[in-house]
Image (cartoon, coloured by chain):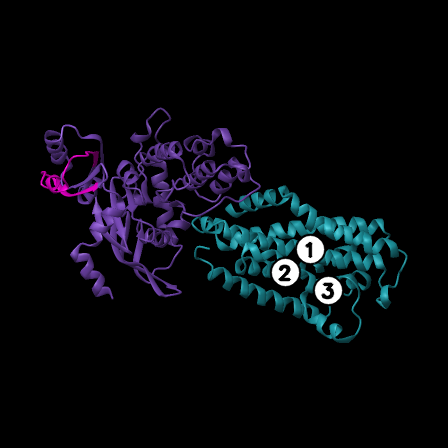
Amino acid sequence: MRLASSRRGGRSSRRSAGPGETLSSITGGGSARSEGGIRVRGLAKTFRGPQGPIHAVRGIDFAIAAGETVALLGPNGAGKSTTIDMVLGLAKPDGGEVSVFGHTPREAVDAGLVGAMLQTGELIRDLTVREIVAMMASLYPDPMDVDATLELTGLSATAGQRTQKLSGGQTQRVRFAVAVVSNPDLLVLDEPTVALDVEGRREFWVAMRKFAAQGRTIVFATHYLEEADANADRAILMAHGRIVADGPTTEIKARVGSKTIRTTLPEADPARLVALPGVGSADRHGDAVILSCTDSDLAIRALLEQYPLARDIEITGGSLEEAFLELTSDPDVEEAEVMAR
Amino acid sequence: MRGIAYTRYELLRTFRNRRFYLFALGVPLVFYWLLAAPQRNNHNFANSGLSVPLYYMVGLAGFGTMVSMLSAGGRIAGERQAGWTRQLRISPLSVRAYFRAKVMTAYAMALLTLGLLYVSGAALGVSLPAQRWLEMTGLILIGLLPFAALGILIGHLVTTDSVGPVMGGGVSILAFLGGTWFPITSGFLHTLGPFLPSWWLVQASHAALTGHGWPARGWITVAAWTAIFSAGAAWAYRRDTNRV
């Protein structure tokens, strides 16, 4: 009962914002019903596999404050989806606990506080886009307006189409609409842009940020560092079922650190290039030279000073895979891994 | 009552699916006319005491409604494979409301099949007092309960690849042993039949004639299968929480 009344309180505060106000002026996140945010303690999950047990999640802890947008970052198999399944109550943890706004995941879901776009999922057929969104809206105590949802997710023009006739990108938008029409305090997105092209991705994140600006708590899983960087306040980096880094995305990027400079430089000697300030190692592939940098700013200045003929210069950030190798070879983590065995 | 809106959309989806019309409604009708029309004047089919049009009307009603009930379960297999059931599990829609929507949709399909067969039966000379029609319909609807549960059980156990053969094979065997195609009056099959729920579905036609309904054994058999399949369906649903 307490849950129901506190929810009503939150609702009226959100609704009180008039149509003329901007989305960002509405702060639903601070409402009483989303107090406590999300807390995960000692969460663990093991699956039985053909070659013995698979430790998908090995005891993780994190807390997400109400109103925060957090990226769950990691390569395939890091344990992101399993973690999300446990936060949503779709999978039962083998150890540890999850609390969503002070409730169990099941209670939060039953109260209509949670909306989610799962990683895999098609739409049921024989309904129009508008009907499937309206159908989902009918399941929640306090849904968003169907037209407003279609507008937000860029589906107004396709509202009358049958779900089985949509393109991959449109299907993904409908799945997003299904997640947000519930008017959730917590929105969970598991690799939401997997099926989208570049333009689709851009539009998706614009819609997501618009939604986030209403003070919602958002958790999304991705294996793209750029997506986390551009759309989250904070990233939780996972590898092999553990959290290897947790902080603002800029911090994670700094930890990932190493950038690579590629250039065409036929006459250079790798042994001399390594000696340049900010360069960690140098490789030669034909005429091309690849410098792995500890400080790319220093390195590029020194390079151009000493080799003004260097051309076709590219500087690229470290990939997540590299970040992983780096962060998972951290001696602390390795030690913990050994202890876990 | 949030589940009601959901049921409405389930019905809408079902009646928009043309393949459903073709098979769930068309096949029993075609069989009915093929089997019953040539013998429309036979009033004592294989010494059963029933006319051929009445016997096959109820037999095919049993078959057609059985297909309706089980195919509702078959759609669950498709929704599971698509990940849709997982999407529903993270909504406030209760398990009970979800199954109620499935069963109500299945019954709506079954009633449509029944209506069409009754009209066809009347066209072939089946004539019964209103009370008999109602009793027979009531028995058929009750006799479908085990199949509603069986459909859900199958829907949660099999994949979309195998749901067709499982359903097709299951319906054929149950319909044959239940006496859909011809009366089973003696032998091993006659001993086996009354243990099956499909047998009592077909036996609803006797109620139409005598007004006596099922003997106690019929009620017990139907109740037992409903309990068994419901327990199975609940078990299958619970073990099915993981990603498919």
**Residue B11 as seen in the image, left or right of residue A180:** right
Q: Which residues are magenta?
A: A262-284
Mark pair 2, 1: CA separation: 9 Å
Check if mark 2's residue and mark 1's residue have beta carbons within 8 Å.
Answer: yes
Q: Is residue B103 visible?
A: no
Up the image or down, A157 lies above or below A281; here it is: above
The quadrant where residue B189 appears: bottom right
First in sequence, mark 1 or 3: give its number. 1
Q: Which residue appears at 65% of the width and 62% of the height? A: B170
Confirm whether circles 2 and 1 share one chain: yes
* Residue that mark 1 sits on: B65
Same subunit, labels 1 and 3: the answer reads yes
SS class of the residue under badge 1?
Answer: helix
Rendered hue of chain B is cyan
Of all chains in the rendering, the one displayed in purple is A
Amino acid on which disc 2 is placed: Phe
Q: Is residue A99 left or right of residue A255?
A: right
Q: Position of residue B235 (x, y in %)?
A: 50, 64
Which residue bears the numbered disc 2? B147
| Spot occupied by residue A99 in the image (x, y as percentages of width and height) | 31, 53
| N-term mark: 3 or 2 | 2
Q: Is residue A264 magenta?
A: yes
